[in-house]
Amino acid sequence: MDALRRGLTVLSCVLLLASCQEDGPAASTATEPVPDLLSLSQQKCERSGGTWGLTPSKATFVCYRNLSDSGKLCSSADDCKGLCLARSRTCSPIEPFYGCHEVLSKGGVRQTLCIE
């Protein structure tokens, strides 16, 4: 009976982990059609090296851009093209960087910033 219980526990954990999704942009290869009004914006985004995708709320599309200073050490927002993340004291990897994050302001003051 213990072997069966362990097997079911492992199976449950695997199924739970398989249902998780990585945060971040939904790539333009997603099955959601891009409205005609946005197709020019999508083309401009992708030509400039961005990734066209849905916002986390899936309400609209946005151009995600990888930032060249991603992971660089920072002590204030002035040190980064995007956000200076307070916990790691590194520059954010992309913009827009959705969600709530502890960031360092231009003066190096720790703040909570939420981008929806």
Image (cartoon, rainbow, N blue to C red):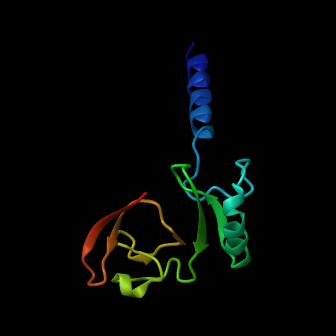
Residue drawn at point x = 69 percent, y = 76 percent: 49
- Where, quadrant-wise, is the C terminus in this rendering? bottom left
- Where, quadrant-wise, is the N terminus in this rendering? top right
Which residue is at the front of the view, 48 or 88?
Answer: 48
Q: Estimate the x, y position of residue 73 in percent, counting from the top left.
A: 43, 82
Farthest residue, direction top: 1
- For this view, does 59 lie left or right of residue 18? left
Residue drawn at point x = 62 percent, y = 32 percent: 15
Which residue is at the front of the view, 83 or 62?
Answer: 62
Residue drawn at point x = 68 percent, y = 58 percent: 27
Q: Estimate the x, y position of residue 26 in percent, counting from the top left.
A: 63, 55
Q: Estimate the x, y position of residue 32 in percent, counting from the top left.
A: 70, 48
Farthest residue, direction bottom: 78
In the image, residue 2 sits, relative to residue 65, either above or below, namely: above
In the image, residue 71 sits, relative to residue 41, either above or below, namely: below
The total of numbered circles placed on residues is: 0
- For this view, does 56 lie left or right of residue 88? right
Residue 111 figure quarter: bottom left
Q: Estimate the x, y position of residue 34 in percent, counting from the top left.
A: 70, 55
In the image, residue 24 sits, relative to residue 45, either above or below, namely: above
Residue drawn at point x = 64 percent, y = 59 percent: 53
Residue 2 figure quarter: top right
